[in-house]
Image (cartoon, rainbow, N blue to C red):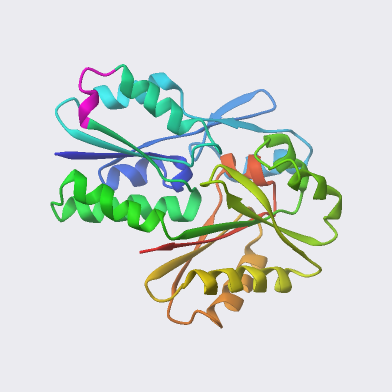
């Protein structure tokens, strides 16, 4: 048997994971005096606290949770599809947990090199391949083909969240005062960091630059595009319409970001991502 595991970077709840026979380990989030688990708490309340000035933080699932999950499936082969190394300690924690297992050779830790939409797709693809009775080697090979063809961009509304999270390349942090403009951040360094991609005067022009990058990547009907937002539905819908005008044959999915990503990108942020199916 093959057991699939992931974290809430994939934007699946624990219950949604169970429905797919996937173990979902929630990331940790804290705000005020509350210590919560991602997608196990009230996102609306979390957002309201952030908007009122509370400073949130997030971290990877505790190693004890990962060890417990691995121990529950000692008889199975396990593939753990983790959030991008560098953006979270989830991947490193999974490796440390694997090292403590007696059946470590049956555990496969995959660095997705991504988060949110594309991460979600990788889990869905793994489930499909597992249900088709593909081998672990075949599943990993197919997932790596998708990982090799993906791009992620983030348009923040409040740059202080990204600065505080420390996930920016040093030069990128200097544009924080330009938020009357629209800075677009791109995931770089094998997914480990965010760097400045472009700065435009309007959201439409910023999205046009993302679309141009997708065109250079060769995005077509064989890709999937995700637009994810943190309480910015109207902007997200406009962005989807703009993207559809160019990529009419490409599937586009709208997602809401979880508290862990509101912590990093701030309220109003929008992620635009694509991955090869």
Q: In this image, 49 relative to 74: left or right? A: right
Quarter of the view holding residue 163: top right
Residue 6 at x, y percent in the picture: 37, 39
User: Quick check: 116 above or below 8?
Assistant: below
**Residue beneath the point at 16% across and 32% down:** 76
Question: Closer to the camera, 240 or 18?
Answer: 240
User: Quick check: 170 above or below 199?
Assistant: above
Residue 22 seen: yes
Quarter of the view holding residue 268: bottom right
Is residue 84 rendered magenta in the image? no
Quadrant location, the C terminus: bottom left
**Residue beneath the point at 45% across and 34% down:** 26
User: Quick check: 117 above or below 264?
Assistant: below
Residue 72 seen: no
Q: Which residues are magenta?
A: 101-106
Residue 71 at x, y percent in the picture: 25, 22
Residue 91 at x, y percent in the picture: 44, 33
Residue 53 at x, y percent in the picture: 79, 37
Q: Report how many numbered discs are placed on residues in the image.
A: 0
**Residue beneath the point at 15% across and 47% down:** 135
Q: In this image, 141 relative to 81: left or right? A: left
Quadrant location, the N terminus: top left
Question: Closer to the camera, 160 or 109?
Answer: 109
Q: In this image, 31 relative to 69: left or right? A: right
């Amino acid at each position: 048997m093959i057991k699939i595991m992931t974290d809430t970077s994939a934007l699946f709840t624990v219950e949604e994971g169970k429905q797919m026979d996937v173990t979902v380990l929630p990331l940790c989030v804290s705000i005020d005096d509350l210590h919560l688990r991602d997608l196990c708490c009230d996102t609306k309340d979390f957002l309201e606290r952030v908007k009122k000035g509370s400073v949130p933080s997030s971290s990877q699932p505790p190693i004890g949770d990962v060890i417990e999950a691995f121990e529950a499936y000692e008889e199975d082969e396990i593939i753990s599809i983790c959030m991008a190394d560098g953006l979270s300690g989830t991947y490193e924690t999974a490796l440390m947990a694997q090292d403590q297992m007696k059946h470590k050779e049956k555990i496969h830790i995959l660095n997705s090199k991504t988060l949110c939409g594309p991460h979600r797709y990788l889990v869905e693809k793994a489930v499909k391949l597992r249900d088709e009775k593909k081998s672990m080697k075949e599943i990993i090979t197919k997932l790596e083909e998708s990982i090799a063809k993906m791009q992620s961009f983030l348009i923040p509304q409040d740059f202080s969240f990204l600065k505080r999270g420390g996930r920016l390349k040093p030069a990128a942090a200097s544009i924080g005062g330009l938020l009357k403009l629209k800075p677009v951040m791109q995931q770089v360094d094998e997914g480990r960091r965010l760097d400045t991609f472009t700065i435009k005067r309007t959201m439409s022009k910023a999205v046009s630059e993302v679309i141009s990058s997708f065109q250079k990547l060769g995005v077509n009907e064989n890709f999937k595009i995700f637009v994810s937002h943190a309480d910015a539905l109207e902007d997200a819908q406009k962005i989807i319409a703009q993207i559809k005008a160019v990529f009419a044959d490409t599937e586009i999915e709208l997602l809401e970001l979880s508290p862990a990503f509101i912590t990093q990108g701030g309220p109003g942020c929008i992620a635009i991502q694509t991955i090869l199916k």
